[in-house]
Image (cartoon, rainbow, N blue to C red):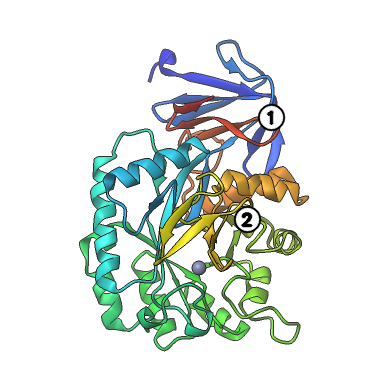
Amino acid sequence: MTDHDETMVAAPRLLMPGGSWSGPRAVAMSAGRISRMLDGMPVGAESLVSGALTPGMLDLHNNGAFGVDFATADTAGWRRVLAGLAARGVTSVQPTVITAPLPEILAATRRACVAMDALVGEPVARVLGIHLEGPFLADSRRGAHRADWLLDATPGALDVLLDDAATRRLLRTVTLAPERPHGLEAVRRLVGAGVNVAIGHSDATTAQTLAAVDAGATMVTHLFNAMRPFAHRDPGLVGAALTDARLWCGLIVDGVHVDPVACRLAFQAAGDRLVAVSDSILIAGLPSGTKLEFGGSEVAVDEDGVGRRADGTIAGAGIVLDEGVRRMIAAGIDPATVLRAATEAPARALRRDDLGRLAQGALADLVWWDDDWVPRRVWIGGVEVKHD
Ligand SMILES: [Zn+2]
């Protein structure tokens, strides 16, 4: 490494690990990583005179965007969505595949492997691994997942997933309902195979939730949505999620799936365990009024960035995560707290110490936000991928 390979960018304030602001400071980047952090606006640094510099965002729950559904996308589709996300400051994503017959899930994972190999070295969002949301979900909390495709997580069903080469390579997280038959055995086996288990689309009581956490589950999928509602004598999965320090809490931050007041409650209760997610579907990032076919019916993007069917029912979230950041800030949550939930928290939830932090040795994924919290410039591995 030589000095002239190093590039530096400085800003009035930087989001530091732990969620505090510091500045003015500079980030020096070399060979794809942050080589050092410097105080002030050093000579030789490109100095940004306003706004804030943060790590790139990680979206752990994203079914697609920009007209592309990860479950069915070919390599061109993967390129389009990963480039679009990068330009919005989402520098890493955990593509999410919802409930489908197991052969279709395997086929989606194989297409993902082909796309990953084809996109090596391209300036697009990193793929953190695949998130399977289903098919081991509770029928009573299935939401938009098809009832006839739900399964118990039997040893045979897990064999189908874990014996497949593509799935072994890319499977990172499984969302399941631990109260289903074989649920706890499945948690232990998946965790033993290096897969994160998230509890979601579940009717679990508090006791059932804690049994799953004891078995190794570490996350909760879209807190409040598709789970037993919180009640003071039956706090369920929500109560366990908000109070148990072992659980990372995914929260859809579009301000529609969860009311802004409930979002504030979640941020206050879960603190640095709160993980902001989009749970976007393919309509995200498209102009309002756009109509697309999704899940067998026509879905239109409304002015709130929500996908709705013709009868008005919600078909999925239509925000990219930067829009969620702005909505949470507008809801009165401290910007540093929101941004930590979109950067450092998801990285830690996946045990990726090399992501989500402006610190020496971390991968050089950065976002420069303007004073209205719009991402204006983005770097991935020290290479600028967007410059307004
Ligand atoms: Zn869901």
Residue nearest the viewer, comparing 7 with 68: 68
Say which label, 2 or 1, has the lower sequence index. 1
Q: How many marks?
A: 2
Q: Residues within 10 Å of mark 2 (few under 14, many from 20)?
A: many
Label 1 C-beta lies within 8 Å of the nearest ligand 1 atom: no
Q: Is residue 219 above or below residue 122?
A: below
Left or right: residue 155 compared with residue 290: left
Q: Looking at the picture, how far across and down is residue 366, in whole percent?
A: 53, 33
Residue 273, quarter of the rendered image: bottom right
User: Which residue corresponds to mark 1?
Assistant: 13
Spatial separation of the CA atoms under disc 2 and disc 1: 24 Å
Q: Looking at the picture, how far across and down is residue 138, in whole percent?
A: 48, 82
User: Which residue corresponds to mark 2?
Assistant: 253
Q: Is residue 359 above or below residue 353?
A: above
Q: Looking at the picture, how far across and down is residue 103, in whole percent?
A: 24, 70
Question: Which amino acid lies under the numbered mark 1 shown in the image of this protein?
Answer: Arg
Left or right: residue 69 compared with residue 157: right
Name the quadrant of the N terminus. Answer: top left
Q: Looking at the picture, how far across and down is residue 106, in whole percent?
A: 26, 65
Disc 1 is placed on an element classified as: loop
Name the quadrant of the C terminus. Answer: top right
Q: Residue furthest top?
A: 43
Residue nearest the viewer, comparing 1 with 233: 233
Left or right: residue 300 compared with residue 146: right
Question: Which amino acid lies under the numbered mark 2 shown in the image of this protein?
Answer: Val
Disc 2 is placed on an element classified as: loop
Residue nearest the viewer, comparing 160 with 138: 138
Q: Residue at x 61, y 77 (%)?
A: 237
